[in-house]
Image (cartoon, grey):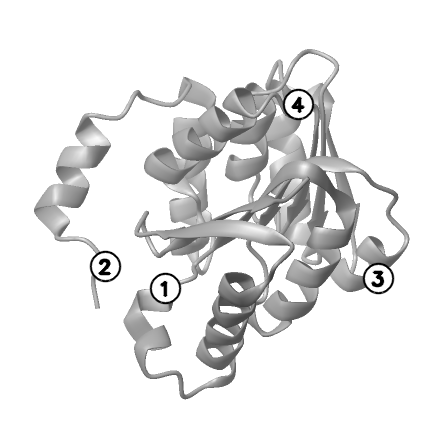
Amino acid sequence: MDIVDKDLERYAFEHTQAEPELLRKLSDETYARMQMPQMLTGRLEGRTLKLLAQISGARRVLEIGTFTGYSALSMAEGLPEDGQVVTCEIDKVHAAMAQRYFDQSPHGKKISIRTGPALETLAGLPGPFDLAFIDADKENYPAYYERAVELVRPGGLILVDNTLWSGLVLKPHDRESIAIDAVNRRIVSDTRVENVLLTVRDGLQLVRKKG
């Protein structure tokens, strides 16, 4: 199901500031070459990520799930020159394409890719981070969230993507929708944080760790 009316979605897209040309090129190549191009963050959410990184004053960002690099570049754009994005990606083809675009961007020097299973990377990753963005395999969302809470500083942000999962969270029945529903329930009852579940694209949890 569509979360937002398609005409309203198009209107919002048209009235959101355009992303840099390199990101448009990355989007075009992702849709031309990748099997599941809908995983791309895109303009609406990408500009949201950039603004949240900028508004929050983030300097160190953790991303779980790189895909082809659109979201990492969007967040890096909102960081100061000495900012850092650490992004985790298990697929080497995705990581290679992302790195190619990072190398073309003035913000690419802020980004480092860690390849391999994200939970293994996260286990050995030192904090604190100012912001974490979770957009990887859905079955591990509960575990990713718990580790993100540990790694993000008090007052920092955690963003969790696809938290409406095309409406399937209303009646979760498969492993992905059950895991997403579980993390949504965990977040809203977690006394360590405050949150709002936004109807941006496929659902975006905006979570602030209390400090």
- Marks 1 and 2: CB-CB under 8 Å? yes
Q: Tell me the crowding category of disc 4: few under 14, some 14 to 19, or many 20 or more residues within 10 angstroms, Cα based.
A: many
Q: Examine the rendered structure and indicate whether residue 140 appears above or below residue 124.
A: below
* Mark positioned earlier in the residue sequence (3 or 4): 4
Label 4's element?
Answer: helix
Q: Position of residue 199 (x, y in %)?
A: 30, 52
Left or right position of 65 against 129: left
Label 2's element?
Answer: loop
Question: Residue at the spot x=59%, y=62% of the render?
Answer: 190
Label 1's element?
Answer: loop
* Mark positioned earlier in the residue sequence (3 or 2): 2
Q: Position of residue 5 (x, y in %)?
A: 12, 53
- Residue behind mark 3: 120
* Mark positioned earlier in the residue sequence (1 or 4): 4
Left or right position of 20 against 131: left
The foreground one among 79 and 99 is 79
- Marks 1 and 4: CB-CB under 8 Å? no
- Marks 2 and 4: CB-CB under 8 Å? no
Q: CA distance from mark 1 to mark 3?
A: 27 Å
Q: Tell me the crowding category of disc 2: few under 14, some 14 to 19, or many 20 or more residues within 10 angstroms, Cα based.
A: some
Q: Examine the rendered structure and indicate whether residue 115 appears above or below residue 20.
A: below
- Residue behind mark 2: 3
- Residue behind mark 4: 108
* Mark positioned earlier in the residue sequence (1 or 3): 3
The foreground one among 138 and 70 is 138
- The amino acid type found where label 4 is placed reads Gly
- Residue behind mark 1: 164
Which mark is nearer the camera, 3 or 4?
3
